[in-house]
Image: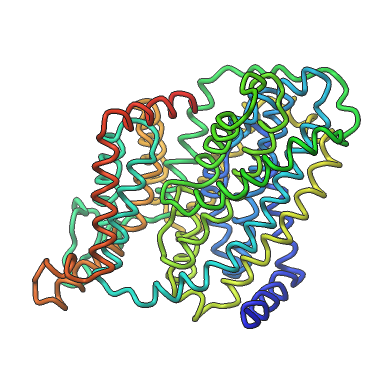
């Protein structure tokens, strides 16, 4: 425990460097901004900023991207409460009670409860990561190729189960992502595969144009077809101080939401959105008077806001310890690490301890920054809500094209950006979530590499995946997930959950 404390202090020293403090502040500001502005989201924004991270130090880049991710959870609550329009997906359930509180003249307490619950969850999640990530990384160092292969299979199946839409469409996205990851020159044979005779594809499909196209460009195109209507609460916000009764009701809800969010953030496919919905459903189920929910219950604001911030932060644990991204934003973080030549996984803690502990410690600083940023600047965020979203479209498109071109000075990658942007837009129209595709694209090369190693070490014997205890347990969990999700009751519950979310 003493060594753990010393390592956290060293990470704090890294995060407290002036440059890293600046990038943490920038990330928190951008995250709040995109959370406030409906139509943008952390996935699209992080995708657009990937080229920028190419020119930053790895620690600074990840600190900034992490700040954007959990900062969006803070900003999203502002629009959810004042406009009844979630700035991003994890703030959807905050609309239900937050907006009702605002209509009752209690917008100030609702905003304060959301910010304080998020702060508590952020601080708890930071120490949760510091406490549990190192032992998990040590366990992961015992993994061989077979274990890693089975772990990735489990992660992919969990991503399918937790993806929006039908299971078949999520499975299709996984398969497509694997195929796209295999484009390029085979490492072992040196032969090009699936390049269609295009020389530019010999090095494979770039992560940046794929991610920016599927999320940033597609999101921009999707928002162009949506009419803008924002019913802004006209009443003056007034005092931000919650009443004693508000504190009494919100505190236990925030604690429960924090714990639930911290656990669900570890799951592949989990993160902020899943945590927020689960926390709200749990609070409503255990409430003595569930009819209060949807009519301005303060627990309906505290629990999901705490859960989404805790889930956003603990979703970094699978990436930093196992090398498995748990959702689309974390997959983009993995891409940013790979751009800098850092392989996500357990060796990050041993080979790059300043990055590992620096990012964790920056979350503590970033959460404090977010409260300081959000509460005093509410009037500024309200003013920004009056800016028509259509004014941002040209800027987003130009920034995306310049960003992709600047990475490798390649006009072909700009063309890929457009192709994947159209593909991403088509996928949303077909109700296919692109997040599993991105996860499979990131994990595809790792899965192929570990599969080949496992088969080579076992002299071609596939039983190695079931004879090694850890690998067998992971595969058994994957099979259990598949069996559970095809059960009629579970499938019906899953469909209803996603209908409520949309």
Does 187 sit left or right of 291 as displayed? Answer: left
Please tell me which residue is depicted at 75% across the width and 31% down the height of the picture: 384
Locate residue 173: give its quadrant.
Answer: top left
Determine whether 122 is above or below 346 in the image. above
Kindly give the residue lying farthest to the right in the view shown: 239
| 23, 170: nearer the viewer | 170
On the image, the x and y values in percent for residue 237 come to 86, 27
Please tell me which residue is depicted at 68% across the width and 43% down the height of the picture: 254
Determine whether 131 is above or below 266 in the image. below
Please tell me which residue is depicted at 24% across the width and 58% down the height of the picture: 475
On the image, the x and y values in percent for residue 250 come to 73, 37
On the image, the x and y values in percent for residue 144 come to 28, 75
Locate residue 308: give its quadrant.
Answer: top right
| 161, 356: nearer the viewer | 161
Q: How is the image coloured?
A: rainbow
On the image, the x and y values in percent for residue 121 come to 67, 50
Please tell me which residue is depicted at 35% across the width and 47% down the height of the picture: 158
Does 197 sit left or right of 416 as displayed? Answer: left
| 172, 468: nearer the viewer | 468
Report how many numbered discs are placed on residues in the image: 0
Determine whether 285 is above or below 439 in the image. above
Kindly give the residue lying farthest to the left in the view shown: 460
Kindly give the residue lying farthest to the front in the view shown: 288
Quadrant containing the N terminus in the rendered view: bottom right
């Amino acid at each position: 425990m003493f060594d753990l404390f010393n390592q956290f202090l060293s990470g704090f020293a890294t995060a407290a460097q002036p440059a890293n403090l600046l990038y943490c502040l920038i990330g928190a500001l951008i995250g709040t901004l995109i959370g406030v502005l409906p139509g943008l989201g952390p996935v699209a924004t992080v995708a657009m900023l990937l080229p920028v991270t190419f020119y930053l130090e790895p620690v600074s880049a990840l600190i900034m991207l992490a700040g954007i991710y959990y900062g969006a959870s803070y900003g999203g609550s502002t629009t959810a409460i004042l406009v009844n329009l979630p700035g991003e997906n994890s703030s959807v359930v905050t609309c239900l009670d937050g907006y009702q509180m605002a209509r009752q003249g209690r917008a100030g307490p609702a905003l304060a409860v959301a910010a304080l619950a998020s702060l508590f969850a952020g601080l708890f999640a930071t120490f949760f990561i510091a406490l549990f990530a190192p032992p998990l990384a040590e366990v992961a160092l015992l993994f061989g190729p077979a274990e890693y292969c089975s772990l990735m299979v489990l992660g992919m199946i969990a991503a399918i189960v937790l993806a929006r839409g039908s299971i078949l469409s999520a499975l299709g996205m996984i398969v497509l992502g694997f195929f796209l990851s295999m484009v390029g020159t085979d490492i072992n044979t040196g032969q090009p595969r699936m390049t269609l005779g295009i020389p530019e594809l010999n090095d494979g499909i770039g992560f940046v144009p794929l991610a920016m196209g599927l999320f940033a460009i597609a999101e921009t195109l999707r928002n162009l077809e949506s009419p803008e209507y924002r019913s802004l609460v006209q009443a003056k916000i007034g005092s931000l101080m919650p009443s004693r009764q508000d504190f009494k009701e919100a505190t236990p809800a925030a604690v429960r939401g924090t714990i639930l969010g911290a656990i669900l953030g570890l799951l592949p496919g989990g993160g902020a959105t899943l945590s927020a919905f689960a926390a709200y459903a749990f609070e409503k189920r255990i409430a003595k008077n569930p009819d209060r929910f949807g009519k301005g219950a303060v627990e309906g604001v505290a629990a999901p806001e705490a859960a989404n911030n805790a889930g956003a932060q603990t979703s970094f644990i699978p990436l930093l310890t196992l090398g498995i991204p748990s959702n689309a934003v974390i997959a983009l973080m993995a891409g940013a690490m790979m751009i800098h030549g850092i392989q996500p996984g357990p060796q990050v803690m041993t080979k790059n301890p300043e990055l590992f502990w620096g990012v964790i410690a920056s979350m503590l600083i970033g959460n404090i920054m977010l409260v300081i940023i959000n509460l005093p600047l509410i009037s500024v965020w309200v003013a920004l809500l009056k800016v028509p979203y259509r004014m941002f479209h040209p800027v987003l498109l130009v920034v995306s094209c310049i960003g992709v071109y600047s990475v490798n000075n390649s006009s072909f990658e700009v063309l890929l950006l457009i192709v994947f942007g159209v593909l991403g837009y088509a996928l949303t129209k077909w109700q296919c979530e692109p997040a599993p595709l991105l996860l499979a694209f990131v994990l595809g090369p790792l899965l192929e590499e570990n599969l080949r190693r496992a088969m080579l070490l076992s002299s071609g014997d596939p039983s190695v995946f079931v004879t090694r205890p850890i690998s067998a347990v992971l595969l058994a969990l994957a099979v259990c997930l598949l069996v559970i999700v095809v059960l009629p009751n579970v499938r019906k519950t899953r469909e209803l959950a996603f209908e409520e979310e949309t």
